[in-house]
Amino acid sequence: METKVDLIIPVYHPDEKLERLIEKINSQTLKPDHVFFMQTLTGTEEDVRVREILERAGHAVVTTLEKSEFDHGGTRNRGAAMSQADYMLFMTQDAVPVDDMLIENLRRAMEASEDIATAYGRQLPDDKVGAIEHYTRQFNYPPESSTKTKADLPVLGIKTYFCSNVCAMYRRTVYEQMGGFVLHTIFNEDMIMASKVIQAGYRIAYAAEAEVVHAHRYTYREQFRRNFDLAVSQRQYREVFDGIRSESEGIRLVKKTMKYLLSKGKWYLVPDLILQSGFKFLGYRFGKKYDKLPMGIVRRFSMNPSYWNGGRYEKNSSDHNGNL
């Protein structure tokens, strides 16, 4: 009996990539049994137009929610609760498959061994993001596939837990065993899940042949805010991330990127790299100390200021031990 795959995609204020994504979903060699779209409403006429686009996907199921209901982990959990498939593929609205083999290649990676709980795909840059982001994608998503286990922690450090819900497939039985994604996290629900499956003795596969185009050209301010939120999540889930080598990985990326730029004769981009790295570092350091900052400053520094509304963040600090 052939294994089944469902696709789960949160959607909010999408750009033109959504239509290309749906075209690629419809042309896959392995068709998903369902495509669960979790559409966060904007309260504008855009909502009707977006729903019409979503319904072009084969076997589409559209669930709407208010912006106040959105949660990185919780919204994905709501989609997963509707699935009875063997595998659940989570994607973002701006990740466009390179070819028609994405789902098939991810399933093949999952079926290589019963102890593989998750398989995530390779993210490639588009032509708009520039040389620095091109190399960053190559650094984080190399052309060779691999698997990771608990035994890799001393060598890989935090990269052992690296996994991205931009394009990641999960074995539903293990996902349920782990209790789903954590709730009320500002960031990193995928890496927190990855840490749980690694600690439980499962493996994570990186399927380099499963490719999507996905990259962002962040401003310096956006780099700061994104890394602030990253550090907040690591601080709030410190039982996962404390004691795991992480900052040295960032330093290694900066050094290798600089070497790459010089080798390509793009020395003039080195100041940009230094500024990007500086803003990332400052955001990360402030995020690690977020609980000592005034709330007004925290909201200004965060890429997700609505996360801090209504005391939702307080649930994280009191509930997260039970979720891991």
Image: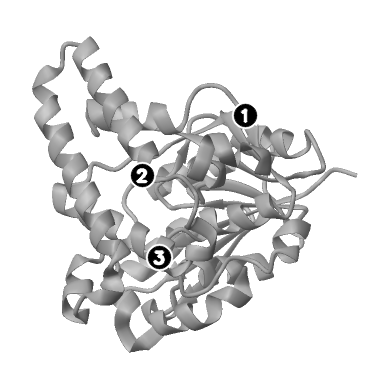
Question: Which quarter shows the C terminus?
Answer: bottom right
Q: Which residue is mark 3?
A: 235
- Marks 2 and 3, Cα distance to the nearest angstrom? 14 Å
Residue at horizontal 53%, vertical 36%?
156
Q: Is residue 259 left or right of residue 37?
A: left
Q: Amino acid at mark 1?
A: Ser
Between the C-alphas of marks 2 and 1, the distance is: 23 Å
Q: Which residue in the structure is indicated by mark 1?
A: 146
Residue 154 location, x and y as percent?
Answer: 57, 39
Asked if labels 3 and 2 touch by Cβ distance under 8 angstroms, the answer is no
The residue at the point 74 percent across, 49 percent down is: 201
Pinpoint residue 273: horizontal percent, then vertical percent: 17, 33
The local secondary structure at tag 3 comes to helix
Q: Quadrant of the N terminus?
A: top right
Do the CB atoms of the residues marked 2 and 1 lie less than 8 Å apart? no
Q: Secondary structure at mark 2?
A: helix
| Labelled disc at residue 247 | 2
* Residue 153 position in % (x across, y down): 58, 41
Reading the chain from its start, which is encountered first: label 3 or label 1? 1
Frontmost residue, 283 versus 38: 283
**Kind of residue at disc 3:** Arg
Q: CA distance from mark 3 to mark 1?
A: 28 Å
Tag in front: 2 or 1: 2
Camera-side residue of 276 and 309: 276
Sequence-first disc among 2 and 1: 1
Mark sitting on residue 121 = none
For the question of whether residue 60 can be seen, the reply is yes
Q: Which residue is found at the position 54% from the left and 60% from the top?
A: 240
The answer to whether residue 126 of the structure is visible from this angle is no
Q: Residues within 10 Å of mark 1 (few under 14, many from 20)?
A: few
Label 2 Cα crowd, 10 Å radius (few <14 / some 14-19 / many 20+): few
